[in-house]
Image (cartoon, helix red, strand yellow):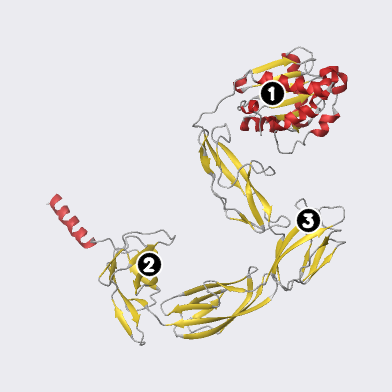
Amino acid sequence: MKSRWAMALAGAALVALTSQAGQTAVLIKQRSAASAAVTPGKWHASWSKCKKYAEENGVPLIAVWSNGDSCGHCVGFESSVNSAYFKNWMKTSGIVFMFTYPGDGGDGKIASKFFHWCRKNTNTAYPFVRIYWPKGKVDVATIGDKVDGNKDGTTGGKKAVAFFKDKLKKFNPVKADPELPYSIEFDPNYTPGEQNANDVTNGMDSIEALYGTPVALPSNIFTRADWAFSGWAKSATGAVAFKNEASVKELTTKSNAVVKLYARWTRMTYGTYYTGVQYTIKPTTYAGAAYAGYKPASAIAGLTWNATKGCYTGKPTKAGTYKVTFKMTGKSNVVRTFVVEKDGIELAEAEGKYVDIDTSTKLDSAITAVSGGLTDVTVTGLPDGLTAREGVISGRPTKPGEYAVTVKGTSAKGQKLSTTYTFTVKEGNAILLNGLAHADELWAFTNDDLSYSVAVKVKHEDGSYELVKPAAAEIEVLDAEENPVDNVFAFANGTLTGTFSESGVYTVTVKTTVDEEELSLGFTVNVLEGEEENSEENNEENSEENNEANP
């Protein structure tokens, strides 16, 4: 958390401290690589990245140029900033720190640029403090022996902290316009194909925000198998900054900026496996370290643990969730959860092993496996009117009865699977269109006056049937892109009437209720371009007008 004074410095304050002296090995070792992401409270190597971060996040930037041993004041200053007091202040300051030295060739040779700028703009008593401010305002101050504490690190550390606080508070922070617009994007923070993880699914739309107005983050819809969503971070490797659906504000001071928040994950299980499939499972820690030398305290049925290689081998034999504690002398215990499922065939739209359908219903049911895809599919025993093609059972059954349908195939894991379902085909209540219970495809022209009779075939307890006109019906019309089309049909007195004004392929669904049972019938109308409405009358009117104009 930033200290109160640092928070008050929100704006694009950029502070650069330089000293002309020799190479400083201690600070060089502490700084992050130029390729690393910028984090406040730590030393960094890239001036351009630090400056960009400071400007976008409204925090100060202190950059150090030093050559160490050749300058007594610089040696004292280095002792100050390496003290525990100064380092503790760094961590909570909210400030970005950057260090460079003579000969540091990276980042556009910024070390040389710092040195020459300071020599030009101040005297030669080292170190220097250079303060950048928005709109080009610059302040230069000489530290000299004010912060080194005569090489006493703790005393110097306190002096350095006091010096920076005093210098920075003389500047007023640049306040952002409360109506400043920016947007927030959401990153799943995972690349499909990484070790020990599954694909992230779904996507999230960005949201718009105003600087001075709190905005609620949308509920996370990213999913990652075997992992739980922990919250949102400001960087890909950062700690969780916001919980799900948290209220946030003032994430940037830059107009029309794009702020990206990154999903952070906590592993729930190590992985999901299937019975009867041969595996070599080599678990690793989140950092990628192997478990060689560890021993599991419990077993997974069908798998053998090799402590030397740190892996399981074999075929799981029993489905279940296995929470395994791995132990090794001198190391902390590690707990991982393994899920074993029984692979099998799944039939869409099937309730358990039964599919109840009547003679007015068209079936369109995909065949898959629990573990994913299914190949080499064969289906036997289907009722008349149903076919299996390319992994889908479709059609309209024509004969009532119970049918034992056997589905076979090879799962994505290479297993030969077989499942038998019971299909129950019954004759029940059904909607009839022009006397038919399955008017799949009709044809028409634009501007045709269409009329279809709608009746319901009602089955009585004694097995007899009766045709009745429904008192009301709900009509839905969708175009080829599944967009609703309004005001096409009207329903009255058992008749559906209407006109299509544009050509295309339309899906029509008729819904009604009989004895509290909801019935529906869908059909397709292929509409071709017809002649213009009242074209003969228009021609006659045009002819009369021409005669009047040319007597």
For the question of whether residue 66 can be seen, the reply is no
Mark 3: few/some/many CA within 10 Å (<14, 14-19, 20+): some
The answer to which of marks 3 and 2 sits earlier in the sequence is: 3
Residue 15 is tagged as 1
Q: Which residue is mark 3?
A: 334
What is the distance, in whole Å, between disc 2 and disc 1 at their CAs?
Answer: 69 Å
Quick one: quadrant of the N terminus?
top right
Point out the residue furthest to the top here.
123
In which image quadrant can residue 262 be found? top right
Q: Which structural element holds mark 3?
A: strand
What is the distance, in whole Å, between disc 3 and disc 2 at their CAs?
Answer: 59 Å
Residue 480 falls left or right of residue 532: right
| In contact (CB < 8 Å): disc 3 and disc 1 | no
For the question of whether residue 365 can be seen, the reply is yes
Q: Which residue is mark 2?
A: 508
> As displayed, is residue 533 above or below residue 154?
below
* Mark 3 vs mark 1: in front: 3
Mark 2: few/some/many CA within 10 Å (<14, 14-19, 20+): some
> As displayed, is residue 72 above or below residue 230?
above
Q: Residue at x 37, y 63 (%)?
A: 477
Three-letter code, disc 3: Val
Q: Horizontal and vertical percent for residue 160?
A: 75, 21
Q: Horizontal and vertical percent for residue 197?
A: 70, 57
What is the distance, in whole Å, between disc 3 and disc 1 at their CAs?
Answer: 45 Å
Q: Closer to the camera, 417 or 486?
A: 417
Three-letter code, disc 2: Val
